[in-house]
Image (tube, rainbow, N blue to C red):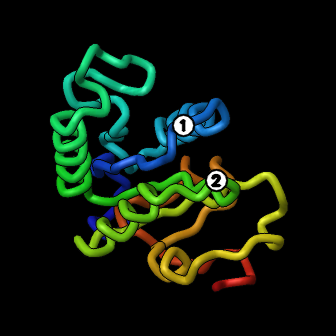
Amino acid sequence: MTKRDVVKANTKIYLGSPFFNDVQKERVEVATKHLEKNPTLELVHFPFDHQYGGASIENKEEGLFGSLEWQVGTYQNDLTGMETADAGVFLYDIDNLDDGSAFEIGFMRALHKPVVVVLLGEKPLEEYELNLMIAQGGTYFVNDMAELETYDFNHYPSNQPSIINII
């Protein structure tokens, strides 16, 4: 084995996802299980695990959740998570587009970091339209979360989305 073909767990990723309903929350758990099996990953940062002051949708601490203090703190925590990550993995819910996920994908790309986009929807992907900023902003597109177990976060191969309709 040479340094050109070694597999090493040295990558920190930012796992971005909407987290507003039971389906989205379950997807995070499924993706996490697949990522845990990836030999090139060292650390997964999921921003909902690091909400400012411990306040979140599920834990609405009196007076903190939703306040300007919470908004600024959570936003800064998320930016730091993306800035200190080597790459991003985003669970992109095509049925419930999330402005936050789109922002985070753009922010990661502005930082010149690779972005793996997991396309998730209830219909076959060919029936969807994908915004060209997401279609061109992603480094690699995944249709099956099991692919997260084997994606090479040491070298970041690229591909194109399988959605035919780009708008």
Quarter holding residue 54: top left
| Dot 2 amino acid type | Asn
The answer to whether the residues at label 2 and label 1 have Cβ atoms under 8 Å apart is: yes
Residue 30 position within the rendered picture, expressed as x and y whole percent measured from the top left: 60, 35
Q: State the SS at label 1.
A: loop
In this rendering, position of residue 73 left or right of residue 59: left
Question: In front: 80, or 160?
Answer: 80
Percent position of residue 144, x then y: 69, 54
How many residues crowd around disc 1 within 10 Å: few (fewer than 14), some, or many (20 or more)? few
Q: Indicate which disc residue 9 carries.
A: none
Residue 11 percent location from the top left of the image: 29, 51
Q: In the rendering, at what x and y percent does residue 137 appear?
A: 45, 77
How far separated are the C-alphas under marks 2 and 1? 10 Å
Residue at image point 27% right, 65% down:
3
Which corner quadrant holds the N terminus? bottom left
Please give the label number shown on residue 96.
2
Residue wearing tag 1: 20
Q: Nearer the viewer, residue 41 or 97?
A: 97
- Indicate left or right for 120 with 156 as reference: right
